[in-house]
Structures are given as structure tokens and as C-alpha cells.
Amino acid sequence: MASISSILTPTNLIHSSKKPTDIPQTLSSQFLRPISFHPPHILLRISPVAAKPPTRLFAVAEVATQGASSVAERKLYIGNIPRNVNNEELTRIVQEHGAVEKAEVMYDKYSGRSRRFAFVTMKTVEDANAAIEKLNETEVGGRKIKVNITEKPVVNTVDMSFLQAEESQFIDSPYKVYVGNISSTVSTETLKNFFSEKGKVLSAKVSRVPGTSKSSGYGFVTFSSEEEVDAAISSFNNALLEGQPIRVNKA
């Protein structure tokens, strides 16, 4: 049996003290080794992802261009609609023949009345063509409506500078009457001369479908006093203008 003095020799003490130290050094090198290689692996994974966005951007730009070019082919002009037809009612009428993306009835900025025409954008070109086929020349509220693609000309070429000058020459006034149900052949000059028979007219104009010379079926006549407005309504409401009874009331 070994003596206590032999166990506690300096050699044994030194030998035993190295073993605990060797183990942590070995373990620490094992844990640190894989950590030092992580950054390169992370960079390799990021690199292929960073190269993809340009491809996606080009694809989006191409789709956006195609979408913009197709809007004109899906947008319908709908004319001669009743005045009581609003956006919701028009959507209901048209969507029976195809999916509607947007419907917008046009209103006069002076009177707030419907201008009897609207624009409807359909979901697809097929929906637009179906709506034209089913609705053009049909009756809505007793009026025969016109339906066509907006990019197609609806009238012959006209001198637009003349129409712009006609609009700019109109003199607005708080003493104004709205003249509805006028014939498509009535010009601004005809309207002014007609009302001049019973009093002094300040100005007159026939409203046009934007970008065309086509009459919207109504117009305005301005005067210098309230008395002249009352006299015009009394004299001309339901009167015949070029064979068609007109409606006259305060604007």
C-alpha cells in the first residue's frame, strides 16, 4: 500500500494538474472551429438571392405596360342615357353582360345634371365586346343608348379650335336657364337666336360630348336679370325648337 507521502509527491501533483487544463482547451477548439466557417456559408446563401430582383423588376414593368395599353380597348362610351341613371344603376345594367371594373356618369359642372353619357371600363376586352353587342341601340328608360369603344371615333373630323373658341366665349351668369331635350342639329347660334326672340340674351352654348362636335342634348342660356330668366321659362318651356319640345328651367 502506497504511503501518503508517495501520493502527494510534486510529480503527481504536477501531472494531475495538467489533465483538467487539457480538456477545456480541446473542447474550446472544437466549439470555435465551426463558428469561424459560418460567415462564408452565409455569404454564399445570400449571393444568389441578390441576383434575382432585376429579373422581377423587368417582369413587373412588362406587365404594367401591357395593362396600360389594354385599358383603351376595355373602356366603353355609353351615350344618350336617362338623367336619373347614376354610377350604381349603370353598373347594374352593364354587368349583366360582362364584369365591370369602373362606371362613371358625367355631370355638368354648372348645373350638376347628368350629361346623358358615361364611361365604363370593363374587366376584359371580351367583356367590352359582349357589352357592345348586347347593349348598343337598346332602350334604357325609354331612350335608345349608344355603346362603343372610346378609342373609336364617334363623329367625323371637326375643327376643334372652333369648338374651343365657342366654349371660351360663353359668358356665365347667376341668371341662367338650363335647356334640355334639344335636337342634335341645334347649334349655339340657333339656341341664342331662339331665346333672343323674347328678350335680351347675354350668352348661350350647346354642351358637347368632350373632344367631339356631338351635342349632349342640352345647353345653357344666360341673362342679365331674374325677370328675364322668368320670362324665358314662361315663354319657352315645352316650346318646339327644330321640331322637338324643349325643357327650360332655372340652372
Image: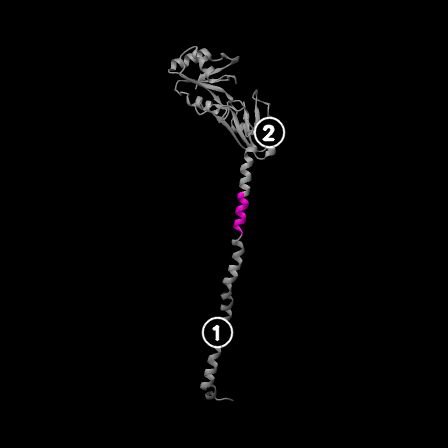
The residue sitting at 51% across, 59% down in the picture is: 43
Q: CA distance from mark 2 to mark 1?
A: 83 Å
Hey, what amino acid is under mark 1?
Answer: Gln
Q: Which residue is mark 1?
A: 25
What is the basis of the colouring in this image? one colour
Return the mark for residue 15. Answer: none
Residue 55 part of the magenta-drawn span: yes
Residue 66: image location, x then y, percent:
55, 39
Q: Quadrant of residue 67?
A: top right
Magenta range is 52-61
The residue sitting at 60% across, 33% down in the picture is: 127
Mark 2 Cα-neighbour bin, 10 Å: few <14, some 14–19, many ≥20: many
Q: Secondary structure at mark 1?
A: helix
Q: Nearer the viewer, mark 2 or mark 1?
A: 2
Visible residue check, residue 8: no
Residue 59: image location, x then y, percent:
55, 45
Mark 1 Cα-neighbour bin, 10 Å: few <14, some 14–19, many ≥20: few
Return the mark for residue 131. Answer: 2
- Earlier along the polypeptide chain: callout 2 or callout 1? 1
- In the depicted view, which residue is nearer to us: 45 or 83? 45
